Amino acid sequence: MKPIVTVAEREVRSYFAAPMGWVVIAVFLAFTGYFFWAPLSLAGVGDLRGWFNNSTIMLIILIPAITMRLVAEERQRGTIEILMTSPITDTQAIIGKYIGALLFYGAMLALTLQFPLALSRLGTPDKGPIYAGYVGMLLFGGTFLAIGLLISTTTRSQVIAYVATLFILLFLWLLVWASQGEAWWQRLLSYIALPTHLESFGKGLIDTRDVFFYLSFIGGALFLSVRALSAWKWR
């Protein structure tokens, strides 16, 4: 457990020590702030359900910036050899890096709590959709992070890691458009599409099937990341 905590702390510190981490936070807050205040000021609508949906779109662009450096940067600089020769397993290294990225993402989400708090000052919003929405955002972003970590593990180029992750996340998002129908393959695409499982959270419902889907996706991506890291060590 201690090696995992050490790696996670190292990753969190690196995010806040680098300008990129602060840029990601600033961009995320700028756009999520716009998504919240624009409908509220223009139409008097304080619906956080639409805010959650719009905010997740920003994650397609920002999550790759968070994950592209996790392993690719270390392979590029040669510091991955130092990590791998230390008393730590591949699984511990991957889990530690994932937890570090997840903590950084969690800090980003925590900074947006000002929006529902402001809404509470203006009225009496239903707390259920707010709580469930943040759980959904955490799972949704956590799934994106796991995918990005997997891609970062397979290359030494941060640019390739960013572009490949962006493409895959966009593809998984756009599957929703191709799943409008009752054919078996359309239902399959609807199940695979990540945004489909986010809908119930916005309604204030925490469906165990959706939670299981995201956790399974995360677990599968982390498993493949461990295998990819192990395969790289034997090259």
Image: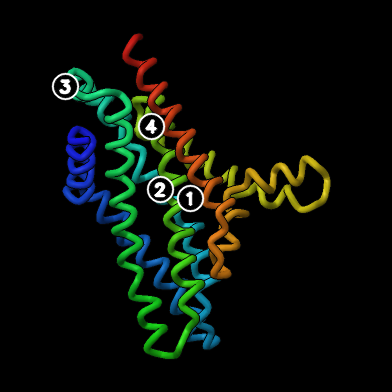
Residue tagged by mark 4?
Answer: 152
Q: Residue 64: x percent and y percent? A: 41, 43
Of 213 and 174, nearer the camera is: 213
Asked whether residue 160 is in view, the answer is: no
Which comes before the other along the chain, label 4 or label 3? Answer: 3
Q: Quadrant of the C terminus?
A: top left
Dot label at residue 86: 3
In the rendered view, tell whether residue 191 sits above or below residue 90: below
Which comes before the other along the chain, label 3 or label 2? Answer: 2
In the rendered view, tell whether residue 168 sits above or below residue 46: above
Q: Residue 82: x percent and y percent? A: 17, 21
Amino acid type of the residue tagged 2 in the rendering? Ile
Report, in whole angstroms, how far the alpha carbon at label 2 lies from the one at label 4. Answer: 12 Å
Q: Residue at x 49, y 74 (%)?
A: 128
Of circles 3 and 1, the one toward us is 3
Of 63 and 137, nearer the camera is: 137
Dot label at residue 95: none
Q: Residues within 10 Å of mark 1 (few under 14, many from 20)?
A: many
Q: Is residue 192 left or right of residue 148?
A: right
Callout 4 secondary element: helix
Q: Is residue 109 left or right of residue 181?
A: left
Amino acid type of the residue tagged 4 in the rendering? Ser
Q: Which colour scheme appears in the figure?
A: rainbow
Amino acid type of the residue tagged 1 in the rendering? Ile
Q: Residue at x 27, y 44 (%)?
A: 100
Report, in whole angstroms, how far the alpha carbon at label 2 lies from the one at label 1. Answer: 6 Å
Callout 3 secondary element: loop
Dot label at residue 63: 2
Q: Residue 88: x percent and y percent? A: 21, 24
Report, in whole angstroms, how far the alpha carbon at label 1 lies from the one at label 4. Answer: 15 Å
